[in-house]
Image: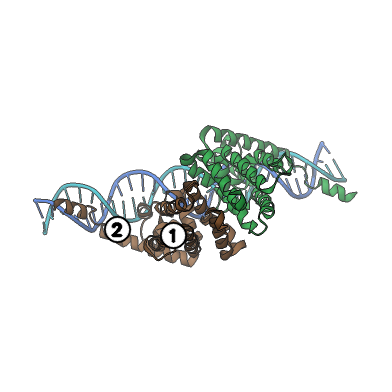
Chain colours: A brown, B green, C cyan, D blue
Amino acid sequence: MELLQILTARPPRERADAVRNREKVLTAAARLFREKGVDNVSMDAIAAEAGVGKGTLFRRFGDKSGLAVALLDDAERALQEAILSGPPPLGPGAPAPDRMAAFAAAYADYLFGHLDLVRMSESASPGARYRVGAYHFWHRHLVILLEEARPDADAGYLAHAVLALLGAELAAALHPDYGEDRLKAGVLAVVSALCGPRGA
Amino acid sequence: MELLQILTARPPRERADAVRNREKVLTAAARLFREKGVDNVSMDAIAAEAGVGKGTLFRRFGDKSGLAVALLDDAERALQEAILSGPPPLGPGAPAPDRMAAFAAAYADYLFGHLDLVRMSESASPGARYRVGAYHFWHRHLVILLEEARPDADAGYLAHAVLALLGAELAAALHPDYGEDRLKAGVLAVVSALCGPRGA
DNA sequence: GTCATAAGCGGACTATAGTCCAGTTAAGCG
DNA sequence: CGCTTAACTGGACTATAGTCCGCTTATGAC
């Protein structure tokens, strides 16, 4: 019984002012990004708009990419839940190659739906992309599917390779020339080729 | 005759002081990078070490990635010449899939041989990688080979996809866990898969 | 209610990329 | 050799990410 109390009460409830300030920051950031574009908003501007100090901003979110991650949280979580427990082929129950294609398509939608924010979350500091929890989730998902579809291949590497095609930097660079549909088709073609000769 | 003079004499010989300063900067940058690591050297430090002003540095090289490109110039040019006129399979004369594999392997060697510098050249400003002349060269090379090996596919996109696997950011992130050989093997496996079912 | 304390706060401070422009000087010409 | 001019130079200046630390305050215990 004591143990239960400890476990449930442990994180001594986030302070009320902290909660308030986090809300203020996220709201302000979302508005500024919407109005002026993600690339034209400085952390100072966000702090000022939110009415908090800069130290607060960085204490809560670590850095610019952390702020982006926080803003993307909802969309990201939705995708993760669809993968874990949604209907196939994105969710469990379909053959691995189908699930991989569904994932690539769904992730591409997520990516293009929030391109600037995702880009900021990936490029704020060098290597940021690979350190974020979400990246590990996508990678793990792909590894499991690849091991099923191609037991002979280096699933760990191939999963990174697929994710490399879904990087925001690449998408942003190619988007003007190629457009969303062509990029999506290209990723699907590569995934299909990787899933084995029969899928090609 | 006048036209010839104009064409040959046009760039009115770089000023002597400019040449001297460019040398000084490149030498100083190379030494500082070697001694302290690419990530621990600021542009101010390079300017100071070279004994020139900061304005000079940026006037000559544009930005940090331009400086990296200048330092990589020799290695990059060597690879380009091997592709254009070296012995097959890297140079002309071999089947397209073989040439693609040879290119991937050779580029990987170049990449790992200068990882930090290449990374700096690609990440100094967002999208820098895709704006540099060399990137267009690699892309064009791959497009030609892909069109030969896979006339039905979207060669333009696939070429970008292959180059995405050879990005410095990705290589730097995976290198500690995967090592050079495994990464190289992985890229070759993807290239092989892309070259068509028979290569898989 | 009051007190102790740790979490939270905010703005001054640092580091660094990149800009700007007034002064300097190399190069070509007569 | 001196003049003209355009390119070059260098350092002061700006913008911005991120750090630091003394002050404030919410919270839980008594």
- Tell me: A113 left or right of A10: right
- Please tell me which of labels 1 and 2 falls first in the chain: 2
> Between marks 1 and 2, how big is the CA–CA gap?
19 Å
The chain under label 2 reads A
In the image as oriented, which residue stretches furthest toward the right? Answer: B1
Check chain identity for marks 1 and 2: say if they share one: yes
* Residue sitting at x 43%, y 66%: A31
Does residue A50 appear anywhere in the picture?
A: no
Picture disc at residue A144? none
* Count of marks placed on residues: 2
As rendered, which of C22 and A65 lies closer to the eye? A65
Q: Position of residue A164 (x, y in %)?
A: 52, 52
Label 1 SS: helix
- Identity of the residue drawn at 49% across and 41% down: B175
Query: Which residue is drawn at the image coordinates 35% and 59% (left, top)?
Result: A52
Question: How far across and down, in percent of the image, does residue A108 sit?
Answer: 50, 61
- Asked which quadrant contains residue A13, the reply is bottom left
Mark 1 burial class by Cα count in 10 Å: few <14, some 14-19, many 20+? some
Residue B116 image point, x, y percent: 54, 40
Chain bearing tag 1 is A
Q: Which residue is mark 2?
A: A18
Badge number at residue A45: 1
In front of the other: A79 or B189 = B189
Does residue D2 sit above or below A151 in this rendering? above
Q: Nearer the viewer, residue A100 or B2?
A: A100
In the image, taking residue A103 as reference, residue B56 lies left or right, namely right
Amino acid under label 1? Ala
**Element carrying mark 2:** helix
Quadrant of the rendering where the C terminus of chain A is positioned: bottom right
